Every structure is written in C-alpha cells, then in structure tokens.
Image (cartoon, coloured by chain):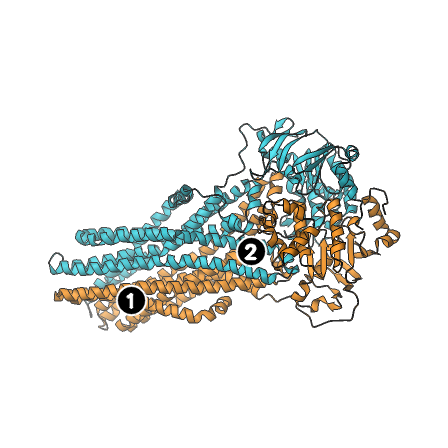
Amino acid sequence: MRRGGGKQATNPKAPETLKTSRFYVLKRLWAYLFHYKWMLITATILMVISNSFSLVGPYLSGLAINSIQPGEGEVLFQQVFFYVGLMIGFFVLSSVLEYFMQILMIRLTQRTIRRLRRDVFNKMAELPVGFFDKHQTGDIISRITYDIDTINQSLQNDFIQIVTSAITIIGSLTMMLIISPILTLVFGVTIPASILLTKYMVTRFRPLFKKRSVKLGELNGYVEEMISGQQTIKAYHQEENMIERFDEKNNEAVTAYYQADYYGSMVGPSINFINNLSLSLVSVAGALLYLFNYLTLGGVSSFVLYSRRFSGPINELANIISELQSAFAAAERVFLLMDEPSEAKDVLDAHVFDQAEGNVRMNKVNFGYSPDKMTIHDLDFEAPSGNVIAVVGPTGAGKTTLVNLLMRFYDPSEGTIELDTVDTTQATRESLRSSYAMVLQDTWLFSGTIFENLAYGKENVTTEEVEKAAKTAQIHEYIMSLPNGYQTVIDQEGLNISQGQKQLLTIARAMILDANLLILDEATSNVDTQTEMKIQEAMQELMNGKTSFVIAHRLSTIRNADTILVVRDGRIVEQGNHEELLEKEGLYSDLYHSQFELSA
Amino acid sequence: MNLFLEYLKPLFGRMLKGFSVKFVGTIMDLFLPLILAYIIDVVIPTGNINRVLLWGGAMVICSILAVTLSIKANRMASGVARDAVEDIRHDLYDKITYLSASQADQYGTPSLISRLTSDTYNLHRTIGLMQRIGVRAPVLLIGGILMTVTLDPVLTLVMMGVLPFATVTVYYVSKKGVPLFDLLQQEVDKLVRTVRENITGARVIKALSKTEYEKTRFEGVNQGVVDAETKANRTMAATTPLMNLFLNLGLTAVVLASAYRVNAGLTEPGVIIAFMTYFTIILNAMLSITRIFVLLSRGIASADRVHTILHTEPELEIQPLDQKPDTAHIRFDHVSFAYEKSYTLEDFDFALNKGETLGIIGATGSGKTTIIKLLLRLYDADSGSIRINGKNVNSMSLKELHTKFGAAFQKDFLYADTLTENIDFGRNLSHEKIVQATEAAQAKEFIDSLDEGLEHRLTAKGTNLSGGQKQRVLLSRALAGNPEILMLDDSSSALDYKTDAQLRKALTEGYQNTTTIMVAQRISSIQQADQIIMLEKGRIIGKGTHKELMKTCEPYREIYYNQSGGKEIA
C-alpha cells in the first residue's frame, strides 16, 4: 500500500561527497553573490554606516542629557535644542540609509535568485528527455520553487544579520581587549566553546535539514502526480485512499520539518546558554579581580557591559543558524540538479543540416535504456530520400525507441545512424531535430492561444499559413466554433478539447514546419477514421518528397508505405512492402489479417 | 486571517502552554542582567567572595533554566506549527479531491499544486516563527513600558505619543502587503505552470528546437516573480526604518520634555539615563513586532488562497432520491450538456440492459468521451436525466456511484509504483483477480516477460512502458474489480488488431454480466455490441445493431467500408 514514488527522484546518483560538502555549496552560492559584487560592497558599506549611526544616536542623547544634568532651573536649553536637533537629523538620516540598504538588499537578493532560477531552468532545458522520464515532475518543481525560495528568504534576511552581528562582535571585542586583556581570556574560552558546539550541532543536524527538503519534494511530487490523475481517482472512488496516502506523505513532510526544527532550535538557546554561562564567569572573575585589586570597579562594569553587547549578536547569529541550514540543504538540492549531466555537447565543428535530403541509414544499431537490457538489437536499414517507412510490430517491440534514436533523444550504444551520410552524432542536435517534423501520440499543448500553439514550431508564421494547416488537419471548423477562434486560450488541461482534437492540432502544428523528414508516431490513434481519411490526403501531400517514418496500428494507413519494417523484440523480423510481406505470410500478414477477424 | 484562527483555535491550549514556558524562559533571561547589576553595584563593594560566588551560582541556575525552557518552548511551538499545517494540508487536499471537475479546471492544476505546496510552506514558516518571536517581543515591550512608568509616567506618555504613528504604519503596510503577496503567489502559479509544461513537453520542445524560446519565455515568468516579490518586499522594507524613526523621534521628544521637567524640578536627570536603557529594550521589541507583521502579511496572503479553496461551495451535491422503476440498467433520458456555450451533447437518449454492450462511434469531438464523463457524474447534465437501475446518478452517493465502474480513459493516469499497485489502485483486490484481469487485458504476456513481473516498478506517469503496454495495464485496472459497468474510452487504440480481437474475445467470454460502454474508432471493436450509437456533433445520427446500422446509417456504412479495406466481410 505504501508508495515510495519519490525514492528514485531524490538522489538520482550517489552524490559525491565533495560536491555536497558545505564548503562547496558555500563557494557556489558565493559565486552567485559575487556577480553583484558592487551592490554587495555598497550594501556592506551602508550597513557599516547605518550601524555606526545607531551608535551616534545614543551618544548625542548622552550629550543632551549632560546639558540637562545641571538640574532644576539650570538646564542649558540652547545646548539641549542643539543636540535634539542633531539627533533628529541623525535619526532621519539613519532611517533613510537603512531604507536604502534594505532596498539594495532586496535588489541584490532578487537578482541573485533570478540568476539562480534561470540557471536551474536553463539546465533543465538541456537535460536529456530521459531525465524527465525518470524523475517526478513535482520534485523538480519543488526545487525551482520551494528550495530556491528558501535560499531567497535566507539571503534576504540573514545576510544583513550576519554582517551586522559581525560588525558588532568585532567592535565589542576590540573594546574589551582595550579594557582588560585578561578578562578577554575568560571569553577566549567561551568563544571556541560556542564555535565547537555550533559546529557539532550543525554537522549532526545537517541530515535533518536535508531530509526536510527531500520530503517536501516528495510531497510535491505526490501532489503533482495525483492532481493530474483526479479524473481516474474519482472514477474508481479512490478519493479516500489517495487522501490517506497523501496524509502519509504529509505526515512525513511535517515530521521532517518538525525534526529539523526540534533539533535546530536547540542551537540558539544553547549558544545563549554558553554566553550566559560565560557572563556569570566574567562577573565572578571580574569581582575576584577587583577584590584582588587587578581591576577598577568601573572597569568591571564597562567590561560586563561590552561582553553583554557581545553576546547579543552571537545569540542572534546562533538563532539564524537553522535558517542557514535550511538554505544550505535547499542549495544542495538545487546544485545537484544543476550538476546532472546535460545532453552531451555537440562535437566540435559539428555538421549543420540545412535542408537535409533525407537519406537515413541505421548501421548495426544497438541500444538499451539501461546498459544491462538492450531494447534494440543490430538494427540495420536504409530509408532513401522521399520514402515512406512504416514501422509495425507488437507493443513493446521498440517502435517508439526508434523515434527516440532518430531524434537523438538518446544515442545508440553501438552502431551509427546517418542522415545524408553524416553520422548524426557528428552533427548539431538542433539542426538534426529541425530536419524532422514530429507528431507523437502523446500530444502536448501549452497554456496559450490556439494560434500560439499551432505556430509554435516556426517563427514569423502568417495567419493564412496557420489557418491553411488547420483546415487541412480538419480542425479549422472546430477552432472557429470556439468563442474566440484562434485566439482562444487553452489551459493545458484543455477540458473541452478532446484527445482526438488535440492530435489534430499537433498535426496542424507539424504541417506548418518545413522539415524534410517526418515522424508520425501513432499520430492519429485517437482520431476517428473518417476524419483520418479526410486528412489522409493532406498527410500524403505532407509526406510527399519527405522521408517519413510512420508508426501506426491501423494497417490501412501504412499500406502504401515504400518499406514496412516489422519489428519484434527490438529486431527487424520482416522487411518489404505490403504485397511482399503479405506473400511471406509471416508476422505482418498475421497482423494484417487479424484486423478483419471477428471476435465471435 | 480566518484560516489561522480556524486552525489554531483547537491548539490555543497548547500554544498557551508553550507561551507560558517561553514567558518564564524569557523572564529568566531577563533576570541575568538584574543579578549582574546587583553583583556589581551591591555585592562587589562588600568584598564578600562567598556572596559573589553565591550570586554567580544563581546566574548559572538562571542560565540553565533559560536554556531548557527556551528549547522546550521552541519545540512546543514547532509541534503546534506541525499539527496545524498537517491539518490544513489534509483538509486542503481533501477539498481539492472532492472539487468538481469544472471547479478544478477553473483554478487550474498548477495553482492547485502551488496552493498545496508553496502556500502551505509559507503558512508553516509563519506559524512557527510567529510563536517564537511572538512571546518574547510583547513581554519585553510591556515590561519595558511598565519600567518606564515607574520611572516617570509623564515621560512614558510622551514616548507613547508615537504609538499611533507606529500603529498606522503597521496597519497600512500590512494592508498593502497582503494583496502584494497575493500577486506574488499568482506569479508563483505561473512559474509552476511553465516549469511543469516544460517537463511534460520536453520531447516536443526539443524536437522543435524551441529550447531557446522556452528559455526566453521562462525569463519572462522569472522576471514576473522577481518583480512581484521586489514590489512586495519594497513595501515591507519601509516598516523597519519607519518604526526606528518613530521610536527614535519619541526618544528625542522624551529628552526635550525631560529638559523642561528637570528645569521645572519635576524629575531627576538620573531618571532619564535609566529611561534610555529601557528605551533600547522597547525599541528592539517594537522592531520584532514589526517583523511579525511583515511575516504575517505573506502568511495571510497564502492563508487567503488556501481559504478560498476550502470555502469553495461544493458543486454536484447529492440530490434527494430520484428513483423510477426501470428495466434498463443504464438510461440516458434526453440528456443535453454543454461545457461552455455550444452544445456538446444534445438530446442524447438510450437505454442499455444489464450485461449488454453499447458501442459508441463518431467523429473527433462529437461528444463520445462526454457521455462517459456524464455517467461518472464528473459533470451534471444541463437537462434530462441519467439513471442506473432507475436511480438518477445525481441522487447517488459518490461511493455508491463510483464503485460500480471500471474505466479506462484515453490519456489515463499511471503513477510511480509497482504494476500490482497500479492495477489494484487501492481496492485491495486479490492477487488472482489481478492476474485474471491482466490475462483478459492481454497484458499477461508482457508482464511475464519482465524480470519482476507484477512487481515491476513504473516510473512517474508510466514512462517506462510503451504506449500499448500502458493501455493494457489500464485495461487490467478497469477489469480487475469485476465492475458492474465497464467503460472503455478508446482504450485499445494502441493495440494491434490481433490483440484487440483477443481482448474482445476475453471480454465477451469472461464478463458477460458486465454492462459495457465502449468508445472506439474501429468498427471491428464494437461490431458485436448489442447496440451501437453513431454520434455527430453531439447528436445521435444512428442507433441499432451493426446489421441495422449497415442498412439505415449511411455514414456508418461508409466508415465500415473504409476500415475493412473496401471489402465487406461479414
């Protein structure tokens, strides 16, 4: 009953320890910030100034009070007014400065995050399609939303905190050293203790924060998957069951969150404790020093004051450690995705197909999605320019794999595929792929107008071209029946567009392309035969002069193919045209005749 | 906001307990400087080492109490946040599950996903942090103010003069902030949608070399999120400096006022110095409180989005019992239905007896799938009634209705789990039933060829199966429950003819009592049906058996000749 769907999605490959080390993540994050080094420097300077200003205020008020000091009837109003005026000036200035610093930080953060998001997306765009076949969509979405947002929040809030705290700590430490080096020694014990404790806790709790990100990713994966399947879930009355499973995932996610919080929230108070402890130590030690005449009372008092000043920012730092840890865990997941191997780069001086003639050859091609299980064996065939090649065979025989190889969604493990005698691995993917027009069974439309969806494959398409394609694909009439015609926005779910209509739209999209090769993988499987026949003519025209690969179960649609490849278990078992194959009385003829057998 | 009240109310007791613990912890923290001052001012001058050590010990004890109580309180707060969010998420998912199809379409899948994820994370963050800062700050604020009152109530009043300004600022900013954060979340919806589209469309995008285009498109979406967030954060950024300014101006006013008061002999200069110390505490507390409001704005925006869904009026409610005596198993009584304006189905009428098979054929977009959706009551008919055993489907409970069916849709849903789980689909069917179903669905052969057989794990959306294999698994799922009504929506399109024929044979032999509705493109798939309906643009243009239709329905005959390769084979 338990689903473990996210399992393979979380850690696609054994993470190299080097790549997940804290230092490595920090370095990469820093590289992002460093792009905006001038903003960073300006922000830091502003922080220093506004922090110093915050000290000027009390100083001025001290002076003002001094002027009040003389007491009843003796107050030096002139001076008081002067200092009060100065105070107002400084406070206004300091607030303005602070505001600008905040704005600057927002800019800096947003730019950094924009770059990070863009890099993740660009990476995604370059990943091989196989990656998306293996990973849960929701988990990937989670990385680009939740994980990046966690980094975002941390940058926005914690960076200022860290710098401010650092400035105060350094300042106070200097003052303390000046007052009494010996007492600083006492503090010298507590600081390493704080650091060691922090380090220990941070290392111990790291897996918890990682788990928190991972579990949220899994929950996201589940949600994405199940919301996509709502209709089926309803039809089988599995709502309650799916809610139960959701509850499990939800519980895991909130528990992981809680666990990280549970231990993470120890860090702040613990550091606080060490500080308080050292404060007690300092007081006692200071008192003793005073009693043995090593220190004046005033010295003790101001030392204690500074050390309190000192412990404040350390506490605040300690309190944001769990935020930082979440951000690190999130960054790690983001970088792991970025480090996934992309589609191999095009070779140097790669061939660029321009108006390919369309001679396709497969030479002894072997291929398997995983190395231990081959899907395609010794595939050998030739498709001369302009020919129609039909691929038939039982399900799972490797027909779609053939498409994957032709389009270079995957590369063969052995053997070569040639287009116009050029080994396709020696050419740019883009030029190879744009040589093909492709219609798949699994239609894909995006949220945009119908026009945008149809014109998607080609730039600067005219309205006439689009309408012509839609007419030939027999979908124009339907489009015109919609309230806004071609400008109707389709949601991806496209509730009132039937599966068959979606296929017709994708066919129209392919018709607009000027590619010299064509792949039709079950392109009309959900289209009724009458409509199919009507577009058949257009399809024939479309195929005219193009090397076409057609995968279809309706053998009527492939009867006219120049060559029919009959594939079984990844091997070509028969090859020839319709008549030849029928004569052979092999698998093809079996398949062909079965369509007229009745089930009575 | 209502959402917070609704879900935190049952946890008030626990929150209160946590707050008390935190309160005591905070007090302990505050004792430390007092003791410290006492040591320096009183104890040290006496020169008594033992008393120094004694008070030092007291400090250590306070520290220990402070640390234990703080950790305890933090954990309790995390616990409250966990439970509240778990409940909110559960209820939200539950609600989404029971939204009607048209309601779900209206929100859109990406928005539903981001409400369940991004928005609930925001809530978790908000509830957690609010509790943590929410106690300390008010305690310090009130404590600080009380201390100043004991020093000089008049000066306190002067300082409090800025409070209205502070309140207005906080009110104004959070009022502006909530809609801005709402806009941000809407941009996040778009982000989710774009990423999702790019994942599902990876093949097409690559095939059409639109990678660069998609990158640009994402750039726009990315910029949208960045702009919305910048705008929201900018508005919020004004709060802290403004608060700082107001309070500091208050302080300046205090200095000025005290100058007069001291001059008039109403107060001592020493009092002002003490006043300053407490002022720092008050200032920090106010800033923390401001931070809570900033946090809350984002939280409220998310809470409202969740709330909207939770309070969506349920559609498709169960109507009062509507039962008529009827011999037919399934009856569509003059049903009309439209998704939007134009009619998708018009005056659709048929009756099917138990164990019979209805075949539906018709052009793309003629309303075939809609019939199945109506029977499942994913939508309600606009007029006419749909009855099973005489009972109107709109008067049946979801359970009563939906446990009758086995259904395979065109673009159906497989998920990352074993084949068994995908076929069983939560119904706890016996192993034999599953195996039987795979046999009938012609899936057994390929399943047996897999190393793990039925325990073979599918990847998300079943991407590691071929199109035909997927359909067989879906068919197995539809058959495995031995359903009362079987609905197959073009679910043999990826099967070759031979397999399709074997499937049909298995259906007629093994599922005689099952009433079947079968949508198909090939006449051969439905030729043996007891009744065949030919649809055109939502209207019935032919009804009868294959033989009858061959005689009476010209379009049907045409299709038949086309599909049989021109020959008539009886």
Q: Which of B79 and B364 is in front in this view?
A: B79
Q: Where residue B49 appears, x then y in whole percent?
A: 14, 64
The residue at which mark 2 appears reads as A223
**Mark 1: which secondary structure?**
helix
Task: Give, as a three-letter code, the residue at label 1.
Answer: Met
Give the answer, above or below, for where A474 lies relative to A570.
below
Task: Give, as a three-letter code, the residue at label 2.
Answer: Val
Q: The orange chain is which one?
A: B
Q: Where residue B256 appears, x then y in whole percent?
A: 28, 66
Give the answer, above or below, for where A533 lies relative to B268.
above
Could you say which quadrant of the image residue B79 lies in? Answer: bottom left
Gap between marks 1 and 2 measured at Cα: 45 Å
Q: Report the residue that reaches farthest toward the top.
A: A421
Q: Report the residue that reaches farthest toward the left.
A: A293
Residue in the image at 65% along x and 34% along y: A435
User: Crowdedness of circle 2 by 10 Å Cα count: few (<14), some, many (20+)?
Assistant: many
Residue A61 left/right relative to A579: left
